[in-house]
Image (cartoon, helix red, strand yellow):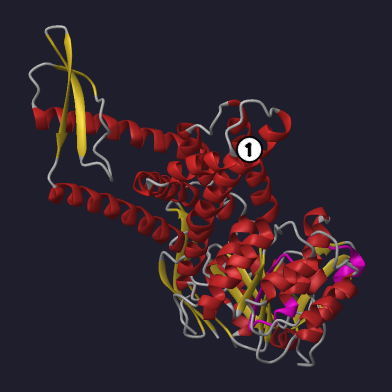
Amino acid sequence: MIKIKGLTFWYSKRNLVFENLSLQLKEGHIYGLLGKNGVGKTTLLKLITGLSFPKSGEVIVDDAIPGNRQPVFLSGIFLVPEEVSLPSMTAMKFAKTYGCFYPSFDLVQFKEFLERFEVKSDQKLSGMSLGQKKKALLSFALASNTRYLFLDEPTNGLDIPSKAVFRSILASSFSEDKTIILSTHQVRDLQSLIDTVIVLENRKIILNQSLDRVAQKFTFGHSLLAPVSGEVLFSTNSEMGQTMMTLNHSGIPGNVDLETLFSASINIPEQLSAVLDN
Amino acid sequence: MNHNFNFNRFWLLVKRQWTENKIIYTIIWGLVSSGMVFLGIFFDKFDNAAGIFLYFLVGAVITMATFPRWSDFGRSAGYILIPASVTEKFLCGLFYGIVLYTLVFCLTYFIMTYLVTYAIVFFFFSNNLLPFHEVITNAINDIRPLRSYFVYFLTLMFAQSVCLICIIRFKKNQLLIFFLVFLAIVFLYGIGMHKLMTEIVNPKGIIIRTPGPFLSVMTPDFGYSKDINNQYVDEFFSFTKLIGNFNRWIWFAVFAMLYLSAWFRLKEREL
């Protein structure tokens, strides 16, 4: 379990990134970490993985403090950064060189994932395109079978078929003892994977809810007509006219439109919380 | 699982380091070898001062190649997140930057300066050539005063620890910053030593130069020339063995502190 308590962090004192932020992330979930650009999604991942240290408060991952960077802790996590930088060696050599540091790394799985992504295992990583590199690193990350997997904008640079392959591989390799955090602003790519959504805004978490609960409480729909005030909690313009978010009186869960939910959480956070916390 | 040092993990890091950097290391080795042969052929014997300069310079470049580029987030994040302790990563760097490098440098020096140079001269400029056994005897005679080489090894450690701190501390222009810092330290050390010697001996004339070695890690002796009535007089001084040893231990303490500082910086490095 990841426990974040009273976390405060800044790069410069005048510009706080997080202020007294608290959060718990449990095993067996795929979390979607959403937020505007520069809100601190990558910073939060850096703090959880121990690449940065809290200014105050604490981050604990399975009783370990990430900032200590103990080998046991590091062998249980994997971070795929948005900007991938890989050494000049073939994908297979990379897997053999780095895989031995991860106790559950599976070379057969790695080869299978590469094949599904259509990445050649004998091609040099340095000669690959950004998308190919990302696919190679995602294959490695998933084959390392770590308990915690942090993916920062994983679908950036992937072509459309590769996004589908990624979703399929991620879903098939996920198990109840794992925790995956997907930081993204391309919610449509990953909507089908995420089971809990976390929205960051103004140095705090303004939404942390399972999509099941969101679906029980709200319905999302499209209309070409302007919304009738009173019934609609939130509406936004979309390519299909108006996308509306209304209260779900029936209690039968429907589909959640993550983009609309994200916009609503930014614009009407109190109303959303009032309904969800009820 | 030991948190701080595990030989298996350390060895995996050593193998990773080689796999990732073998091309760079081989290119550097090739350039150094060619340089040694060039100097060996055209300057009769590989010049000692050039050799020492090469030793420090290449040592700094090897250290640069061994630790990641901190301006590259992906690369440095990958390095920090490798499941091994900071101590193992640090020792792996020192293994390449000091142990392996010094061994390879010395072996290359011997092979290139004496054996290869002899072979080239023998095949292409075979006039006036000393007998092979004499060349090897000279080589061994050159190598024999190991004590005098030790000071270079320690100076490399000093240069490398400064280099390490620069690499870990700064994100860009690390090599340039290292050279500036290193030159500044050497300059300040020179001024400091000169002042210290002047204070200790309290000469009556004006000190012109310091003909003897500086007071350094291996030399508790020093000297200077002074101008007395337009006559240069060289005077040499020697400290007692106790002071000499004390001086030496201070130097070791400085290395240890610099390495410890580099280790600490690496441990506390944030991205």
Q: Please state, as top left, top right, bottom left or bottom right, where the C terminus of chain A lies in the image.
A: bottom right
Q: Is B70 contained in the magenta span?
A: no
Inspect this view and state whether residue B16 appears. yes
Which is more toward the observer, A96 or A47? A96
Image spot of residue B152 (x, y percent): 40, 44
- Image height of A22 relative to B250, above or below: below
- Identified at 64% across, 74% down, the residue is A78
Q: Which residue is mark 1?
A: B118
Q: Is A162 contained in the magenta span?
A: yes
- Identified at 58% across, 68% down, the residue is B13
Which is more toward the observer, A150 or A41? A150
Please tell me in which quadrant of the rendered image residue B263 appears.
bottom left
- Image check: B251 left or right of B267? left
- Image height of A67 relative to B257, above or below: below
The local secondary structure at tag 1 comes to helix
Give me the chain letter of mark 1. Answer: B
Please tell me in which quadrant of the rendered image residue A114 appears.
bottom right
Which is more toward the observer, A83 or A255? A83
**Residue furthest top in the image:** B230
Inspect this view and state whether residue A234 appears. no
- Identified at 76% across, 68% down, the residue is A93
Looking at the picture, which amino acid does disc 1 mark? Tyr
- Identified at 60% across, 46% down, the residue is B111
Which is more toward the observer, B72 or B107? B107
Image spot of residue A221 (x, y percent): 85, 76
- Image height of B271 relative to A268, above or below: above
The range drawn in magenta is A142-164
Q: Are there few (<14), some (14-19), or many (20+) residues within 10 Å of tag 1?
A: many
